[in-house]
Image (cartoon, rainbow, N blue to C red):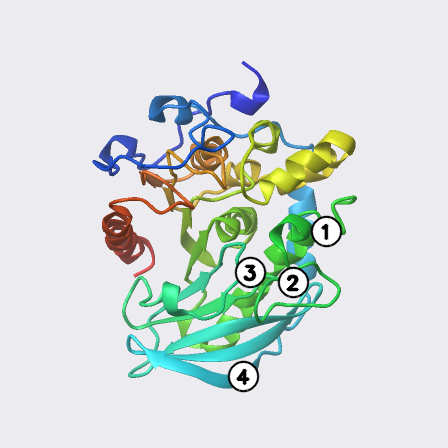
Amino acid sequence: MDAAARAPAPPSGRHTPRDCLQSPHAVRHPPFDFDPTHGRTLDDLLTIGPPDAPPDFDAFWRESKAAADGIPPRPRLGRLVEERDGCRVREISYATLGGRCAALLVLPIDGPARHGFVIGHGYGGRADAGSDLPLPLPGSAAILPLAPGLPELGLRPDLPSDPAGHVLHGIGSRDTYVLGDCVAGLWGAATALLELVPSLDGRLGLLGESFGGGIGALALPWDDRFAAARFTVPTFGNHPLRLTLPCTGSGESVRIHIRTHPEAMEVLAYFDAATAASRVRVPVLTACALFDPAVPPPGQFAIHGALGGPRELEVPAAGHFAYEGEAEERRRLDRVTGDFFRRWVG
């Protein structure tokens, strides 16, 4: 079996794929030019792990984290956006590698914050905080960073805002690839949150969905301020495998790019979320879909399979696709998420 599809060694801690939700609802879908399951059953998907890492993978990321740590965040509060779910939401910005990043800051209206979260977003950007509220635990503060270049607050004239262009920006070198700045944006967000709410004492939860899940997995191993994480339908897992699979998401532009620029695989090896996940030792809850036209399920499960610490798994019927029973599964995931962070962060 090649490295792209080899089974990982069992990690320590909880691993509960058989306890995950098996949807009773069939996913009804129009025809695609490909099968969004890519012919994999759950048993198949649970055998997928990370590809081989470059010898200096860890050194590259530790150096990146050290460079990010050398930049004071200097957070600036902006306008009040809204008040809802017992929280007050404000725009803020902070300094990090690659320049200032925009974000939303969420603080409890009544009483001090007892827990803190950094919450990434999907490749569609973030127009508001609505989909991320209420937070996983009551009495929490959170920072919701905007990846540089993405709508709305993260827009920058020097970066493409469309996913197909953004995911290729700077891909000629590991030092210029835009995903590096996106990872640094999460680290900087944590630093800014802890400066604004020092009572959190460095014990944070990390959440990310799709693009945000992949970036979160890349950021997590190198930052000991995160006590636990949840990644939902995460991308950037096992590039050698995922780039053999067609999709409707940003990975398709990378797959097409690789045909004429195969040397870019050397850069992508440093931005493989499954490789990074194999360095993670804190508890992680993953939600990996069986059917997903935008993010191939084998890449999602590669991240879960690589995790090196306590891990829990939820399996929604589909990702990036509307289906009967989706709201029910999302409510379940929210309940499981609250229980998970209550154990590890609360």
Q: Residue at x 32, y 38 (%)?
A: 317
**Residue 320 seen by the camera:** yes
Q: Which residue is mark 3?
A: 186
Q: Secondary structure at mark 2?
A: loop
* Labels 3 and 2 touching (C-beta < 8 A): no
For the residue marked with disc 4, what is the amino acid? Answer: Leu
Q: Residue at x 71, y 64 (%)?
A: 98
> Farthest residue toward the front?
30
Q: Which numbered marker is on residue 169?
A: 1
For the residue marked with disc 1, what is the amino acid? Answer: His
Q: Position of residue 122 (x, y in %)?
A: 50, 55
Say if 26 sits above or below 339 in the image: above
Asked if residue 284 lies left or right of residue 3, the reply is left
Q: Which residue is mark 2?
A: 149
Q: Position of residue 186 (x, y in %)?
A: 55, 60
Asked if residue 211 lies left or right of residue 178, the reply is left
First along the sequence among labels 1 and 2: 2
Label 1 to label 2, Cα distance in Å? 10 Å
Question: Residue 237 appears in which quarter of the rendering?
Answer: top right
Question: Residue 252 appears in which quarter of the rendering?
Answer: top right
First along the sequence among labels 4 and 1: 4
Q: Which numbered marker is on residue 77?
A: 4
* Labels 1 and 2 touching (C-beta < 8 A): yes
> Farthest residue toward the bottom?
79
Label 3 to label 2, Cα distance in Å? 14 Å
Q: Residue at x 65, y 41 (%)?
A: 253
First along the sequence among labels 3 and 2: 2
